[in-house]
Image: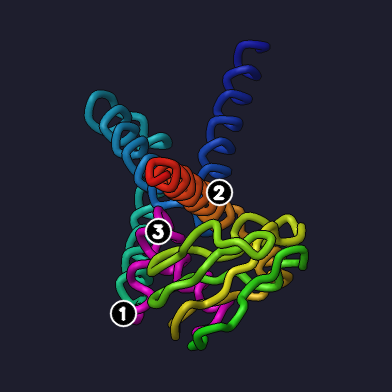
Amino acid sequence: MESGAGSELAWATGHLQYLLLVAAMLPARLARVRIGVSAAAVMGILASGVFSFQPAALFWNTLLLLVNAVLLLQFVRSNAAVRFSADEEPMLTTLLKGLPRARARHFLDQGFWLTGQAGEALIREGEPVTHLFYLASGDAQVTNGGKQVGKLGTGDLIGEVTVLSGDTASATVTLARAARMWCAPAQSLRLYLDAHHDVRHAVEQSFAAALRHKLQEMNRAVAEAGGLR
C-alpha cells in the first residue's frame, strides 16, 4: 500500500514538474534557453515515444516542444520586423552586442538622436554626467585640468564611466567638429537598466570594452609622446 501511494506521488510530481516547466516558458526568455528546452523535449519524445512507450511523458514532452516552437517563431518574427537606421546599425555590434534586435530597438528608443556643434561641451570635469553619448560621426577632445589627454571619434562612447554610478566626470569632452550623436538621459537610463537585467549585462560589457580601448589609446599616446622627446 505504501508502495502504491509512493507510485501515485511520483506520478503526480512528475506531471507537476512538466506543467511548471511549460508555464516557465510562457514569459519571454532568451532564445538559447528556448532552443535548449526544445532539444530536451525532442530527446524526451524519442525516449517516451520511440525507445519506449510512455503516453503521459510523450504528451508532456510534445506539449513542451510545441510551446517552445511557438515562442521561437514569435521571437524570430519580432526580430525580423525590427528596423534600424544607418546610424544605429553599427551600435548593434558595439554598445548592444549580443542583444536580440527587438531588445536593442527597445533600448535605443530610450534615447534620441541630435547633431552637436564644434566647441560644444558634452560633459564637464567635476560635474555629474547627465547623459550617455554615442558618436555616430564626428570627433571630440578629452581634456583634464585644461590639458588634452585624449581624442574620441566615430563609434566611441562618452560618459560610460560614470553615467550609471552618478559620480562626477573626471574629464571634459568637447566636440572638435559637428557630430551626429545618440544620447540618453542618465537618470532614465539607470532606471531602465535596473528593470532590464539582460540589457544591463550587455551594456555594462560594452562599457568595460570601451574603457579598455580608451586606456589602451591613452597609453599609446603617452608612449608616442615620450618617444618624440
Q: Looking at the image, is mark 1 or mark 2 earlier in the sequence? A: 2
Q: Name the mark on residue 94.
A: 3
Label 3 amino acid? Thr
Tag 1 residue: 86
Q: Mark 2 falls on what kind of element?
A: helix
Q: Earlier in the sequence, mark 3 or mark 1?
A: 1
Please name whichever residue, 42 or 14, is drawn nearer the observer in this view of the structure.
42
Residue 61 drawn at (x, y percent):
38, 40
Toward the left, the furthest residue is 50
Between circles 2 and 3, the one closer to the viewer is 3
Which quarter of the rendered picture does the N terminus lie within?
top right
Task: Based on the picture, tell me whether residue 62 belongs to the magenta stretch.
Answer: no
**Residue stretch in magenta:** 85-114
Q: Which mark is residue 51?
A: none
Which residue lies under the disc numbered 2? 24
* Mark 1 or 2, closer to the camera: 1
| Upstream in sequence: badge 2 or badge 3 | 2
Q: Is residue 91 magenta?
A: yes
Q: Nearer the viewer, residue 83 or 118?
A: 118
What's the CA distance linking mark 3 and mark 1? 14 Å
Q: How many neighbours does mark 2 have within 10 angstroms: few (below 14), some (14-19), or many (20 or more)?
A: few
Query: Residue 96, located in which quarter of the rendered image?
Result: bottom left
Residue lying farthest to the front in this orientation: 229
